Amino acid sequence: MKFLKILFVLIIPILGCSKNDDETPPNPDESMYFPSNTDDVWETKSLSSLGWNESAVQPLKEFLNQKHTKSFMILVNGRIVMEEYFDGHTSATSWQWNSASKTLVATTTGIAQQEGLLNINNKVSQYLGTGWTSEPLEKENLITSRNLLTMTSGIDDASELVIKLNLKYLADAGTRWSYHNVFQKLMDVVAEAGSQDFEAYFNTRLKNKIGMDGIWNNGIIFKIYHSNTRSMARFGLLALNKGKWENESIIYEAFFSESIGTSQNINPAYGYLWWLNGKTSYMIPGGQTVYQEPWCQMLHRICMLQWARRISAFM
């Protein structure tokens, strides 16, 4: 059951793998819209104006409800086409971003770099001081902020609790990819480099500029962002526009492009704390196997298998 829940969370990336040369973006000449940062006004667009199949809306809502969806939004050129909430969840309800919080950390790190506060190619100990891990000093000094952004710190991934005792040497930085919570030390790097609390820096440089709400839950193991659905949509709109909000570059396009491109040669399907579709091979959390196929093809295969099992149950 847990696997199936993960499967449905991951089903959206599958859509990014299929291409149809006959398809064209809806209203490509329409201007991009950015909602106000000072009120709740957000322009909408009707399904009929886009030529979408309105009779499919109710079956879609029933499907989302069956899968215990909390909220669902579609934006076209920044305008809301669908916004639905289920099971008591409302537009004001806050919900955890889980691993998507990593993209906020990566973006904030990039902002700190463009302000000249840090350089991701510098070793982490330049900002946190030596002894932030339990590694030998010569091994610790190999770890850069870029390694934290790309999950290639080489730190032992046996424990997700990010305390010094658990940050042990396993491999030289840059030689091993592993999905691990140690990326959270980037929040400390930004805080030290900016001489202020990470959340305060995040709020002024990112959250407030695009009108998000939300807070960081700074737990011991997981530091996860919580916000309402529209705030997630705002960040999605920022990403769609490659880091630009209206006329302001919140995060420079060059860094954003690096973030959503292959960041190292061990796991092509990973950027700067972003998962990437369409690569020829990939790795997954909790293992060192390299799968020689596009990430989304694997998901497609899993979905086909699950659907085949369901069909066979009725035969």
Image (tube, grey):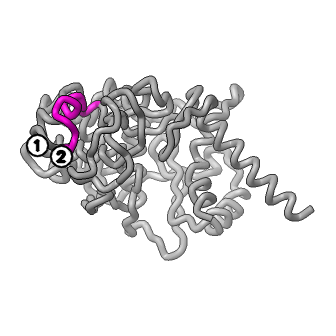
Quarter of the figure with residue 206:
top left
Q: Position of residue 147 (x, y in %)?
A: 30, 32
Quarter of the figure with residue 169:
top left
**Alpha carbons under labels 1 and 2: distance apart:** 6 Å
Q: Quadrant of the C terminus?
A: bottom right
Residue 267 falls inside the magenta stretch: no
Q: Quadrant of the N terminus?
A: bottom right
The amino acid sitting under disc 1 is Glu
Residue 218 in the image: above or below residue 248: below
Dot 2 falls on a residue whose secondary structure is helix
- Comparing 230 with 270, the one in front is 270
Q: Position of residue 60 (x, y in %)?
A: 67, 59
Q: Position of residue 181 (x, y in %)?
A: 34, 49
- Comparing 251 with 68, the one in front is 68
Do tag 1 and tag 2 residues touch (Cβ < 8 Å)?
yes
Residue extending farthest to the bottom is 88
Residue drawn at x 16%, y 44% as measured from the top left: 132
- The dot on residue 251 is none
160 sits left or right of 1 in the view:
left
Q: Position of residue 141 (x, y in %)?
A: 18, 30
| Mark 1 crowdedness (10 Å alpha carbons): few <14, some 14-19, many ≥20 | some
Q: Which residue is mark 2?
A: 188
Residue drawn at x 31%, y 28% as measured from the top left: 255
The amino acid sitting under disc 2 is Asp
The answer to whether one can see residue 80 in this image is yes
269 sits left or right of 103 in the view:
right
Residue 142 falls inside the magenta stretch: yes
252 sits left or right of 193 in the view:
right
Residue 81 in the image: above or below residue 121: below
Part of the protein shown in magenta: 133-146
Q: Which residue is mark 1?
A: 192
Residue drawn at x 71%, y 42% as measured from the top left: 301
